[in-house]
Amino acid sequence: MTHQNHRTGKLPHDPASFWRADVEFPEFPSLQEDLQVDVVIVGAGITGITSAYLLVNEGLKVAVIEADKVLNGTTGHTTAKITAQHDLIYDEFIHNIGRSHARLYYEANSEALEFIKNTVEQHQIDCEFSVQDAYIYATTEKYARKIEKEAEAYETLGIEGGQVDSIPFDIAIQNALVMKNQAQFHPTKYLVHLIKHITEKGGLIFENTTAVNIETGEQPVVLTREERRITAKHVLTCSHFPFYEGLGLYSTRMHADRSYALAVKTKKKYPGGIYISADEPTRSLRSVMVDGEEIVLIVGENHKTGQGIDTMEHYKALEAFGEEVFGLDDIIYRWSAQDLITLDKLPYIGELTSGQPNILIATGFRKWGMSNGTAAALLFRDMIVGKDNPFQKLYTPSRFYANPSLKNFLVENANVVGQLIKGKLDSPKTTPEDLANGEGAVITLDGHRKGAYKDDAGELHIVDTTCTHIGCEVEWNSGDRTWDCPCHGSRFSFTGEVMEGPAEKPLQKYDYTMLDNLTSEDSGY
Ligand code: FES
């Protein structure tokens, strides 16, 4: 195994995902012409690729377009647990959406797990798939009680598992709950295999092809940034944050959450199983064997995107936890991931807006994208071929559960408004001269708020900090050296390029040497 950022005993300098290393990714051209297909799929992560796999198997003509490279978004930065144990959720679901819907959620995710398992077996995919028990543990009394409630919910819903006295780690726990026979795998190895199958069956895949709009109608048309048109009977938007919202108001119904991951070699042997803490800050654990080497993944430190402390501190906290629990020999990768959380914590999967059956969306997987993304693909397949699916109503984006959706709607949007105002009022004291090499910050330049990053060679990169989505102020993410938006999670490189939507346009760039010679009036900002 090659280690991209190897620095024994220290956090790697550059962020890079373990799942992107040592896997040969196929490459695809960008779309150069207009197309007519049965189904166009926007986004080449687990949802888009699994949907394409299922639909080419139905004999449909499918095109997948991806703004970046295949499997490089959330799917390339996951923990890759395949489980229906989505931290503490079933007790809450029973209260908020009812017992039968809570049970359906469990079934949808269990079926997704079964589908992945069968697909791995059927195609003999070498992707380190293994069945594991999943544990959630509490280290405080408050969360020990919540686990008790969750255990009661398992019993009510007939979920296989229950409370256990201990977990095999040096962590002082007060309670834990197991869900039996869950799984883990290597997601990109699995999906690269599905991609091969898709292309062998005539499916088309295009990289570096950004969808920017949809013309609705009987035959919707996806328009790309390069002004290509893809006409289809069905459009699937699987692009994490929807690139097209229609009248679905998704920006007001989701928030983005960022979490951090380390891939480490440990002194102590990993005892098997997949784990997550119920308490804050979250700690999530699993291991993976690669070439006979055991690698442990330590994930957690979630916070709203653009609203955390200095992001390197999150990696350091995971490092300290790993050191305490396992003893660390080496940290070989570090990366962060972004997830979208809906108002009621259920993903939005189905018609983008009700009454529009030919434009479907899947988003808001709340960190559990391996199972929910696969469940979305299975649902899409059934909706397109006209087969009943028991989970369609559960996931439909037009649902509305007054509790907790209404309260969360108000909280989320108050948060966005708060961020919008707060960003405008902040007047940072930092100036470009204060920045060391490799450092970034929001600065004040000629009385105006700007974003500045001084690279390792001392060159300054200055951008306007106003997000091009709807105008919140981006914040510096020191761990990834990106500008992150606290409102809906758009992320930009230090040069201002869009790395993650919903924003489509780059941040405005400024040339510092030119700025230096101009007054603020001359420079027009
Ligand atoms: Fe919506 Fe930035 S992502 S304002």
Image (cartoon, rainbow, N blue to C red):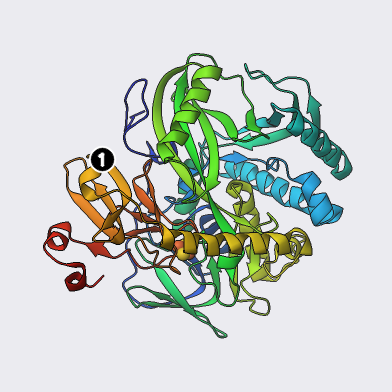
Q: Is the residue at mark 1 in contact range of ligand 1, meaning its CB lies under 8 Å from it?
A: no
Residue at far right of view: 156
The image quarter in which residue 156 lies: top right
Q: Position of residue 400 (x, y in %)?
A: 74, 67
User: How many numbered dots are placed on residues in this image?
Assistant: 1
Q: Is residue 439 visible?
A: yes
Q: Is residue 109 above or below residue 252?
A: above
Which amino acid is tagged 1?
Gly
The quarter of the image holding the C terminus is bottom left
Q: Nearer the viewer, residue 430 or 292?
A: 430
Q: Position of residue 482 (x, y in %)?
A: 36, 50
Q: Position of residue 195 (x, y in %)?
A: 46, 53
Q: Secondary structure at mark 1?
A: loop
Q: Is residue 55 above or below residue 79?
A: below
The image quarter in which residue 354 lies: bottom right
Q: Position of residue 457 (x, y in %)?
A: 16, 41
In the picture, measured across the screen, residue 264 lies left or right of residue 430, that is right
Q: Nearer the viewer, residue 53 or 306?
A: 306
The quarter of the image holding the N terminus is top left
In the picture, measured across the screen, residue 499 lies left or right of residue 231, that is left
Q: Is residue 193 visible?
A: no
Residue at far bottom of view: 217
Q: Residue at x 58, y 32 (%)?
A: 283
The residue at which mark 1 appears reads as: 438
Q: Nearer the viewer, residue 179 or 1?
A: 179
Crowd band around label 1 with a 10 angstrom C-alpha radius: few (<14), some (14–19), many (20+):
some
Q: Residue at x 36, y 66 (%)?
A: 209
